[in-house]
Image: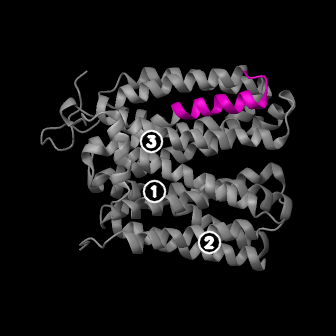
């Protein structure tokens, strides 16, 4: 198959819908490998003779591997091409998933989850870089919005599918399904062209490329984009970690319907991404990012007030949390586009750094909710409020204004 030419070539063909479908699948690996097994966690607790805390660490271990692994895959893909790096990651993902299926203790499961995450993160981080290889500026933001909208379906579908697998087979079958998903994705990967041609690759040694992360972090604009996305992810993982307790234990919302409330945020993300696709055709992505960060700050402060005062009860908190989650559609794609636009030769490294900051911030946000837990919604509201404020400060303090006429 002919190699796709970079977006800088005048005669470069537009990527086909099939290529974008494969990129959507790659970007969805973060959700596929976690949301699918959430309904199986109680069964895993019993089977592995572990307490709930140890099983929850399978998620924390995954996030640690997912955030740190991206820093390695970025420079590898800039030097050797995207397909080799993503393919190597998929092999690790398959091995890690098989290890999870065969685990007989919680500690073994945590270890294999880290291996699984180290492989899965290559697909997520480098799919963004592949979009940057194929598109630039406004079009890149539109394509990322499309991919993120597709990816947002995974948290809705994953728990439902995982629950059916557990009901029909066992929790181990979920990880064998993930093995099959990894193999199918690897086959699909090698049916699409390499997006980074040899003449656009970074020839410097990997050791030096890793050290250049320090240089990237000295770029003020890049720090602004990283901060906007990172603070948002801190709030979103606080939302994931805190809402089960707040909705079910504090407000006594039926556990069997929790997925409906959680799904509201996912629907908000999808709708905001659709809106973002339209907005980037009329405004610069920096302006849309400013809109998203202002909305995140306002909804975050509203969430904090509602959590502290109890005003409006359950729905008084659900509404601002829905708005905060929805800003993902305005912030993520545009912050990634802004981070990548100034570094076309290092798109893999910048994309990896972006992902590491996002998921690393997620560990921090979810950890604070647990650390400050006091039996009320206040810790969740406080972390969400701090995250929203951090989003806007990153935008105002670190991103010099573009001439967005």
294 shown above or below 124: below
- First along the sequence among labels 3 and 2: 3
> Residue 74: x, y in percent?
39, 39
Q: Using the numbered discs, state the Cα–Cα distance from disc 3 to disc 2 in whole angstroms.
A: 29 Å
Q: Which residue is mark 1?
A: 332
In this picture, residue 300 sits left or right of residue 15: right
Dot in front, 1 or 3: 3
Closer to the camera in the image, 341 or 138: 341
In this picture, residue 201 sits left or right of residue 23: left
Q: Residue at x 44, y 69 (%)?
A: 394
Q: Which residue is mark 3?
A: 71
> Residue 90: x, y in percent?
49, 26
Q: Using the numbered discs, state the Cα–Cα distance from disc 1 to disc 3 in whole angstroms.
A: 19 Å
Does residue 129 appear in this view?
no
* 106 inside magenta stretch: yes
**In this picture, which residue range is highlighted in magenta?**
103-119
Question: Considering the numbered disc 2 on the image, is that residue within a helix, a strand or a loop?
Answer: helix
Q: For mark 2, does the 10 Å Cα neighbourhood hold few (<14), some (14 to 19), or many (20 or more) residues? A: many
Q: Which residue is mark 2?
A: 385
Does residue 272 appear in this view?
yes
Question: Considering the numbered disc 1 on the image, is that residue within a helix, a strand or a loop?
Answer: helix
Dot in front, 1 or 2: 2
Q: Residue at x 75, y 77 (%)?
A: 308
Q: Which label sits on residue 228?
A: none
């Amino acid at each position: 198959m002919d190699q796709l030419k970079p977006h800088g070539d005048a005669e470069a063909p537009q990527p086909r819908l099939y290529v974008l479908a494969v990129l959507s699948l790659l970007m969805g690996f973060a959700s596929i490998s976690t949301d699918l097994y959430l309904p199986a966690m109680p069964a895993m607790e019993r089977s592995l003779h572990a307490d709930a805390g140890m099983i929850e660490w399978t998620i924390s271990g995954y996030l640690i591997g997912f955030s740190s692994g991206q820093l390695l895959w970025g420079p590898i893909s800039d030097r050797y091409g995207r397909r080799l790096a993503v393919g190597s990651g998929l092999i690790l993902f398959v091995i890690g998933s098989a290890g999870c299926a065969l685990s007989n203790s919680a500690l073994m499961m945590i270890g294999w989850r880290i291996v699984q995450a180290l492989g899965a993160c290559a697909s997520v981080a480098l799919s963004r870089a592949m979009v940057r290889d194929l598109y630039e500026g406004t079009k890149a933001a539109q394509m990322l919005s499309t991919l993120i909208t597709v990816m947002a379906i995974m948290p809705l579908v994953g728990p439902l599918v995982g629950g059916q697998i557990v009901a029909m087979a066992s929790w181990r079958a979920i990880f064998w399904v993930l093995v099959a998903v990894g193999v199918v994705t690897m086959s699909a990967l090698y049916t699409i062209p390499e997006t980074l041609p040899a003449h656009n690759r970074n020839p410097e040694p990997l050791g030096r490329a890793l050290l250049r992360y320090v240089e990237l972090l000295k770029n003020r604009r890049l720090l602004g984009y990283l901060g906007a996305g990172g603070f948002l992810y801190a709030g979103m993982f606080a939302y994931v970690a805190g809402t089960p307790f707040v909705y079910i234990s504090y407000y006594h919302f039926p556990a069997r319907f929790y997925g409906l409330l959680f799904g509201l945020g996912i629907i908000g993300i999808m709708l905001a991404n659709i809106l973002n696709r339209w907005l980037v055709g009329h405004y610069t992505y920096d302006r849309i990012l400013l809109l998203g960060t202002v909305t995140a700050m306002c909804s975050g402060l509203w969430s904090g007030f509602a959590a502290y005062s109890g005003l409006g009860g359950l729905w008084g908190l659900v509404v601002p949390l829905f708005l905060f989650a929805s800003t993902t559609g305005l912030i993520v794609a545009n912050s990634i586009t802004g981070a990548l636009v100034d570094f076309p030769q290092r798109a893999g490294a910048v994309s990896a750094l972006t992902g590491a900051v996002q998921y690393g911030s997620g560990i921090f946000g979810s950890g604070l909710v647990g650390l400050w837990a006091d039996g009320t919604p206040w810790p969740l509201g406080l972390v969400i409020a701090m995250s929203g404020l951090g989003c806007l400060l990153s935008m105002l303090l670190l991103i010099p204004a573009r001439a967005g006429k």
